[in-house]
Amino acid sequence: MAIKKPLQCVPYARQETGVEIYGNANTWWTKAAGKYRRDRAPAPGTVMAFRGSPENPHGHVAVVREVRSSRILIVDHANWLGRGEVTVATPIIDISPRNDWSQVRVWFIPGDQWGARVFKIAGFIYPERTVASMASR
């Protein structure tokens, strides 16, 4: 019986959204420039791009499933807890002073509370390709 590798966030987000970006999650925001619309506003179906940090240098990506309010999102993502699992319906709260989704906390499922870490967000990548990238195909 073959042992499957744990699922990582990048292939999961690519599979769920069709956003064809490769490489570590912390590179997605830059690689999306000119290929996909990038914005500070979340919407269902977008990819939330987490910046790298000392604790998580490779960054993270999650798929926005629902915008509950101007400060709460629901996402699905893979390998958040480090076991290769897909976690669905995870709440994320915007704690940025300007309500611009630049800083968030993620619901910590094992503790049933908001996580203590603050994560920096690059923004949201929309799955529709831009006109410029379509012309280069």
Image: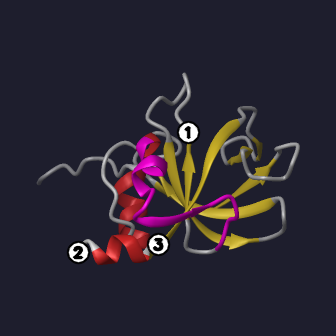
> Image point 84% across, 68% down: which residue?
69
Question: Can you identify the residue that label 3 sits on?
Answer: 127
Secondary structure beneath dot 1 equals loop
Q: In which quarter of the image is the C terminus?
A: bottom left
> Image point 39% across, 51% down: which residue?
31
> Image point 50% across, 45% down: which residue?
60
Which amino acid, mark 1?
Answer: Arg
Q: Which residue range is magenta in the image? A: 27-43
Secondary structure beneath dot 2 equals loop
Pinpoint residue 79: horizontal percent, then vertical percent. 45, 47
Residue 88 appears in view: no
Question: Can you identify the residue that label 2 sits on?
Answer: 137
User: Farthest residue in the right direction?
Assistant: 97
Pinpoint residue 106: horizontal percent, then vertical percent. 70, 47
Residue 111 appears in view: yes
Which of the numbered marks, if any, corresponds to residue 121? Answer: none
Which amino acid, mark 2?
Answer: Arg
> Image point 43% across, 57% down: which residue?
32
Q: In this view, does 125 lie above or below 9?
A: below
Distance from Cα at disc 1 to Cα at disc 2: 29 Å
Which amino acid, mark 3?
Answer: Pro
Q: Is residue 42 above or below residue 1?
A: below
Q: Earlier in the sequence, mark 2 or mark 3?
A: 3
Pinpoint residue 56: horizontal percent, then vertical percent. 51, 30
Q: Do the residues labelled 1 and 2 touch (CB within 8 Å)?
A: no
Q: In this view, does 3 lie above or below 16?
A: above
Which of the numbered marks, if any, corresponds to residue 51? Answer: 1
